[in-house]
Amino acid sequence: MAAAVLAFALTACSSESDRNTWMGREIADVMSSEHGAVWLDRPERDAEELPGRLFAALRLTPSDRVADIGAGTGFFTFPLSERVPHGRVYAVEVHEALIDTLVARAERLGARNVEPVLGAVDNPSLPEGRLDLVLIVSSYHEFSHPQEMMAHILRSLRPGGRLVVVEYRGEDDTIPVAPLHRMSEEQIRLEMEAAGFEWFDTLDILPMQHVVTFRRPVVRQP
């Protein structure tokens, strides 16, 4: 049942209209805020995505500054905030309704280190050169302006800062997710490296998703 719901949900948020392409890949439509909230808060998400494994792999320190791009209702945002009690989590969304949800949840949970950010489709509106980690979970494939977004994200990281991209595996057709909402490791690396990131590692820790880590290059003085 969960697999059927998963396939339906990710197929339903894509229209049949013409889509833009980027580096040989069709860009998926962005979920509406209403559909997205239901999908992001589905009860079985913990069992399907095993977020605890991802959090452990991020190796966060208490003072890290982190951005959660495509934060939705805060599935990753608020656990991240607990792991960086002396840092900050920028929860970036393009839907005002989801920003309102994030603000309300932060107030209710007392998560004072969470800063909801209303971004644009071509700019996440993050501070430049200050972030230790940018996390993008199952959202990058929907970026309508990937080149512009990743240029801003690259600038938001400190030199040596990390980018972690999590996407459903495009190479595995047994995964019950529509093809437009999956990416191969090869495609992820192709697009991130073209944006100026250095590949660091690919972790095989989640049941259905790639976890691919990059860094902002450190410019060494001659």
Image (cartoon, rainbow, N blue to C red):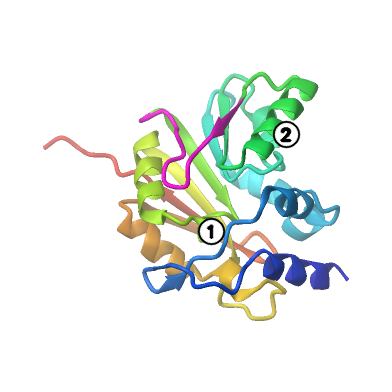
| Amino acid type of the residue that numbered disc 1 sits on in the rendered structure | Glu
Q: Crowdedness of circle 2 by 10 Å Cα count: few (<14), some, many (20+)?
A: some
**SS assignment at label 2:** helix
Q: Position of residue 22 (x, y in %)?
A: 39, 66
- The magenta segment is 115-129
Judged left or right of residue 109, residue 220 is left
Q: Where is residue 181 in the image (x, y as percent from the top left)?
A: 60, 67
Is residue 117 shown in magenta?
yes
Verify CB contact (< 8 Å) between mark 2 and mark 1: no
Q: Nearer the N terminus, badge 2 or badge 1? A: 2
Disc 1 marks which residue? 142
Q: Where is residue 1 in the image (x, y as percent from the top left)?
A: 88, 71
**Residue furthest to the right:** 1
Q: Which residue is drawn at 58% across and 61% down?
A: 167
| Amino acid type of the residue that numbered disc 2 sits on in the rendered structure | Thr
Figure quadrant of residue 71:
top right
Disc 2 marks which residue? 101
Q: Is residue 151 above or below residue 206?
A: above
**Residue furthest to the front:** 17
